Image: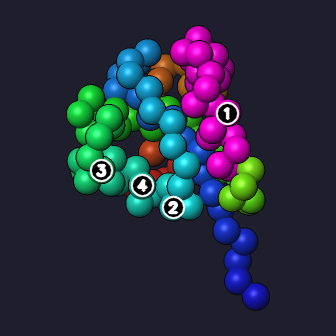
Amino acid sequence: MSAPRSYWVYVLASQTRGALYIGVTGNLRERIGQHRGGELAGFTNRYRVTRLVHAEEFSDVHEAIAREKAMKKWNRAWKIDLIEPGNPDWRDLRFDLHLV
């Protein structure tokens, strides 16, 4: 029997209250490395959106995808209200989650 799989919905920021990006992945360490390394063309690379400011773990991929889709529809104030209670300083959570 294999270990349970984790899926992550994550929020990246360019800086404190800067540009925001929401994504979903089955390998948070690898995906954050791709964003930070500029390996993914598009918004995050163009605007240097690489600071992990929020992450939610799911055991069901469908729940994770549904959460990501819902969050992408939120207005900016709601996204900030999600981030700031758990990360008021907008620090990079890669270190807290041992992703480096």
User: Is residue 36 visible to us here?
Assistant: no
| Residue 76 on image: x %, y % | 54, 15
Secondary element at image label 2 = loop
What numbered label is drawn on residue 9? none
**Mark 3: which secondary structure?**
loop
Quarter holding the C terminus is: bottom left
Name the residue beneath numbered marker 2. Answer: 27
Residue 40, numbered label: 3
- In this rendering, the answer to whether 81 lies above or below 95 is above
- The reply to whether the magenta stretch includes residue 81 is yes
Mark 1–mark 4 distance (CA, rounded to whole Å): 20 Å
Give the camera-side residue of 75 and 51: 75
Q: CA distance from mark 3 to mark 4?
A: 9 Å
Type of amino acid at the residue the image marks with label 1: Ala
Residue 70's mark?
A: 1
Indicate the position of residue 61 as horizontal and vertical percent values.
69, 58
The residue sitting at 70% across, 83% down in the picture is 2
Please tell me how crowded label 2 is: few (under 14), some (14-19), or many (20+) other residues with Cα within 10 Å: few
Considering only order in the chain, which callout, 2 or 1, is on the residue closer to the N terminus?
2
Q: Does residue 73 lie above or below 92 as drawn?
A: above
Is label 2 in contact with label 4 (beta carbons under 8 Å)?
yes
Q: Position of residue 15 (x, y in %)?
A: 35, 22
Query: What residue is pinned by disc 4?
Result: 31
Is label 1 or label 4 in front? 1
Label 1 vs 4, first from the N-terminus: 4
Label 1 or label 3, whichever comes before in sequence order: 3
Q: In the image shown, does 31 or 72 lie closer to the viewer?
A: 72
Q: Quadrant of the N terminus?
A: bottom right
Q: Which residues are magenta?
A: 64-85
Viewer-nearest residue: 97 or 44: 44
* Residue drawn at point x = 42 percent, y = 55 percent: 31
Residue type for callout 3: Leu
